[in-house]
């Protein structure tokens, strides 16, 4: 059978040539930046409950080529998306639906201005992405952080990597009206090849952990389902967790968040939560946070079998206690976990669509994809998308590498 494997790869060595074809020559240097996608290995829906997350940047990149102009004009173009967007650096930027992806870029400029950063001239931008769009691996955050870093470096603004992440998040909140967490922008800004990061989303304390997978690779599996329910269900889950925390605090537990509890402590105080749904939401938060800590230990010890077990347990909890999976994600994860060569799989991201990840032996990746695709198509009625990946660097300049 024919297998749908994500093919979005553009050779970045061609980007300077395409830039000159698009904008012509100039005495100014063309700078090129690479901004990665990410996966979250484990730690789902606990960032807003005081928990830790465990993401890694991956080797799928969005590329930004940028060059100063001698006036105040700004031009954005993308090799895969039609349209030319033109602005002026002195504009008072505001969200406009017709501006499409340019809203993400203007949002960054708006936040930079608000932070007192001066951009002395206009510039031209040409972008292209090897990150599958709307696939749950954070293409929008790659766009925000890649552009923010490119502008900072082009004009020597000296913005730190952590501030690049915070600017991206602030733009989402205030300009795009999306109340996102910090994980995506943070790992994209600060990631390092061959590592994952355990991140406390509340304090921004983080630690690099060696991501040594040996003969195994992460395979990203895209449901290709539009996530219509994700936003409303996200708000509902968040409210349920807040209810659980309030009940425990009312009954004498002096805790700032659910993930401050161990499983043993939770078992002792769970009697106070009479609603079975609220109880299950809280249980996921407590156990998922412990799985993150165990996953960090497993990777440090080189115990991939244990990591695989934790991935499976995470999906089970997200399915049964948090109820954010659905037939598409369950079919991908359950089929992957039953397929030769896979030592663990789970949904990743908000749920109700988007992506799952599987840890698969490199020699079994083609047969694994074929088997999971066949079952998924039988059950769901349309193909999924697949690609294998390795860890990658966070956003960086690659001009000299081209």
Image: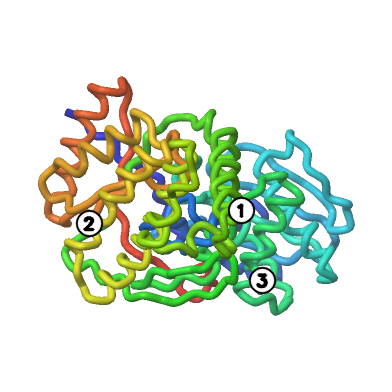
Location of residue 95 (image quadrant): top right
Residue at x-position 45% and y-position 73%: 401
Frontmost residue, 337 versus 71: 337
- Which mark sits nearer the N-terminus, 2 or 1? 1
Q: Which mark is residue 308?
A: 2
Task: Classify mark 3: residues with Cα within 10 Å, few (<14), some (14-19) or many (20+).
Answer: some
The residue carrying mark 1 is 250
- CA separation in Å, label 2 and label 1: 38 Å
Residue at x-position 77% and y-position 47%: 86
Mark 2 lies on a secondary structure that is helix
**Image quarter hosting the N terminus:** top left
Whether label 2 touches label 3, CB < 8 Å: no
- Which mark sits nearer the N-terminus, 2 or 3? 3
Frontmost residue, 319 versus 189: 319
Estimate the x, y position of residue 48 in percent, counting from the top left.
56, 55
Q: Which mark is residue 163?
A: 3
Mark 3 lies on a secondary structure that is helix
Q: Which mark is residue 236?
A: none
Residue at x-position 31% and y-position 66%: 294
- Relative to 2, 145 lies left or right: right
Residue 16, visible in the rendered structure: no
Residue 87, visible in the rendered structure: yes
Answer above or below: position of 118 versus 378. below
- CA separation in Å, label 3 and label 1: 37 Å
Estimate the x, y position of residue 19 in percent, counting from the top left.
59, 56
Location of residue 132 (image quadrant): top left
In this rendering, which labeled residue sits more in front, label 3 or label 1?
1
In this rendering, which labeled residue sits more in front, label 2 or label 3?
2
In this rendering, which labeled residue sits more in front, label 2 or label 1?
1
Task: Classify mark 2: residues with Cα within 10 Å, few (<14), some (14-19) or many (20+).
Answer: many
């Amino acid at each position: 059978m024919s297998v749908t494997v994500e093919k979005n790869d553009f050779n970045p060595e061609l980007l300077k040539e395409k830039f000159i074809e698009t904008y012509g020559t100039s005495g100014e240097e063309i700078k090129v930046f690479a901004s990665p996608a990410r996966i979250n290995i484990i730690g789902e829906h606990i960032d807003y409950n005081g928990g830790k997350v465990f993401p890694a940047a991956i080797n799928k990149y969005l590329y930004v080529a940028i060059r100063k102009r001698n006036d105040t004009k700004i031009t954005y173009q993308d090799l895969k998306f039609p349209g030319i967007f033109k602005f002026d650096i002195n504009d008072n930027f505001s969200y406009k639906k017709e501006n499409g992806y340019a809203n993400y870029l203007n949002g960054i400029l708006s936040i930079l201005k608000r932070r007192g950063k001066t951009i002395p001239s206009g510039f031209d931008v040409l972008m292209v992405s090897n990150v599958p769009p709307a696939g749950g691996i954070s293409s929008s955050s790659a766009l925000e952080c890649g552009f923010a870093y490119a502008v900072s470096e082009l004009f020597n603004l000296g913005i730190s990597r952590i501030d690049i992440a915070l600017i991206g998040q602030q733009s989402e909140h205030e300009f795009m009206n999306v109340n996102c967490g910090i994980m995506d922008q943070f790992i994209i800004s600060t990631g390092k090849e061959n590592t994952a990061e355990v991140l406390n989303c509340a304090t921004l304390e983080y630690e690099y952990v060696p991501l040594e997978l040996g003969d195994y690779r992460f395979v990203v599996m895209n449901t290709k389902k539009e996530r219509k329910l994700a936003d409303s269900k996200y708000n509902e889950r968040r409210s349920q967790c807040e209810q659980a925390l309030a009940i425990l605090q009312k009954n004498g537990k002096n805790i700032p968040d659910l993930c401050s509890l161990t499983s043993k402590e939770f078992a002792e105080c769970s009697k106070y939560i009479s609603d079975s749904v609220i109880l299950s939401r809280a249980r996921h938060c407590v156990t998922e946070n412990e799985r993150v800590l165990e996953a960090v230990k497993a990777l440090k010890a080189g115990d991939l079998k244990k990591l695989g077990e934790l991935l499976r347990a995470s999906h089970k909890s997200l399915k049964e206690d948090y109820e954010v999976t659905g037939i598409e994600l369950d079919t991908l994860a359950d089929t992957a976990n039953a397929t030769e060569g896979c030592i663990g799989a789970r949904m990743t991201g908000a749920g109700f669509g988007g992506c799952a990840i599987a840890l698969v032996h490199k020699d079994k990746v083609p047969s694994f994809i074929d088997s999971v695709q066949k079952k998924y198509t039988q059950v769901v009625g349309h193909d999924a998308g697949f690609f294998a990946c390795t860890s990658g660097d966070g956003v960086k300049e690659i001009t000299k590498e081209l």
